[in-house]
Image (cartoon, grey):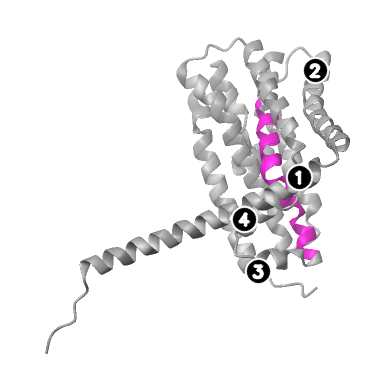
Amino acid sequence: MGSWSCSPCAAGCSVAASENWSCRVDSGRLGAYAHVLRAQVRSQTQYRLSFAMDVVGSIGYGVLDIVTVLVLFRVSRTMAGFTFTEVFLMTAIASCSFAIADAVVGNVERLRIYVRTGLLDTVLVRPLGVLPQLAILDVAPRRVGRVVFAIGVVTVAAINAGLVLTPARLALLIVAPISGAVIFSAVYVGTATVAFWWTESGEMGNALTYGGHDFASYPMSIYGTIFRRLLAYGLGLAFVAYYPTLTLIDRADPLGAPVALGYASPLVAALVAAAAGLVWRTGVRRYASTGS
């Protein structure tokens, strides 16, 4: 009796076919996301005057961040020992980080509405990722104006601070807003996930997202120990702008941390994102249809 054997050629063809199929599936998913995104952008830019006003309004939020710093320094020449140029750079990086996060995943905060109305059920039955769908379900192109404005403010703040841009510091100046955006995005996702257990969690989520933006915009030394432990280190908000700014201006931390700690922002962002991802997956697995 002959023994059955698998042809190496047949096995190779099978693997190639499997990889081909996987590539086609990935391309199909990306195409589906792109189609939904284009549809959202077209629908919101159809009325050009309204869209232009929305863009101007979104830029206004960035302007308010800067005005707030100006008002504070009209009252005092320093803030916990930090000068205007130093706090201005800190606020600029925090605002840029938040603007990017808000543009990319800001719509996730509406999860509580989708859960309560049953709209999330229609998202779950589609063969696409739940989180990416929610991010582009009601995307707001007007927020791009705030991002562009924030990038300009970071540039002005860096010039105003007279930074000595070594290659390492230049890389940090570019990476810091991105790392901060990842941290804010993680806070957005983590707080939104609470809606799987408590649909009226909106105020708590806003306190940590928008409140977190304000918290990260100023020196950590002005806050009490409890706030620093919970928000600055627990959520990683100190690594959005505070530690990167200290590294950029080569200033010692009043709280005693190493000057180079700003370079750890990408690592902290990855850890916070991983934690938010774990919470998100737990919430999605726990979710039961509203039946509506």
> What residue do we see at 73% from left, 15% from top?
78
Please tell me which of labels 2 and 4 falls first in the chain: 4
Q: Residues within 10 Å of mark 4 (few under 14, many from 20)?
A: some
Residue that numbered label 3 is attached to? 125
Q: Nearer the viewer, residue 279 or 133?
A: 133
For residue 217, above or below residue 169: below
Q: Residues within 10 Å of mark 3 (few under 14, many from 20)?
A: few
> What residue do we see at 37% from left, 63% from top?
17
Label pair 4/3, CB-CB below 8 angstroms: no
Q: Is residue 66 magenta?
A: no
Cα distance in 3D space between marks 2 and 4: 45 Å
Please tell me which of labels 4 and 3 falls first in the chain: 4
Please tell me which of labels 2 and 3 falls first in the chain: 2
Quadrant of the rendered structure where residue 234 is? top right
Quadrant of the rendered structure where residue 155 is? top right
Q: Residue furthest left?
A: 1
**Circle 2 SS class:** helix
Segment colored magenta: 93-116
Please tell me which of labels 2 and 1 falls first in the chain: 1
For residue 64, above or below residue 114: above
Task: Give x and y (percent) for residue 54.
Answer: 84, 36
Quadrant of the rendered structure where residue 245 is? top right
Cα distance in 3D space between marks 2 and 1: 38 Å
Q: Residue furthest bottom?
A: 1
Cα distance in 3D space between marks 2 and 3: 50 Å
Residue that numbered label 1 is attached to? 42
Instruction: Note whether residue 236 is visible.
Output: no
What number is the disc on residue 70? Answer: 2
- Mark in the foreground, 2 or 3: 3
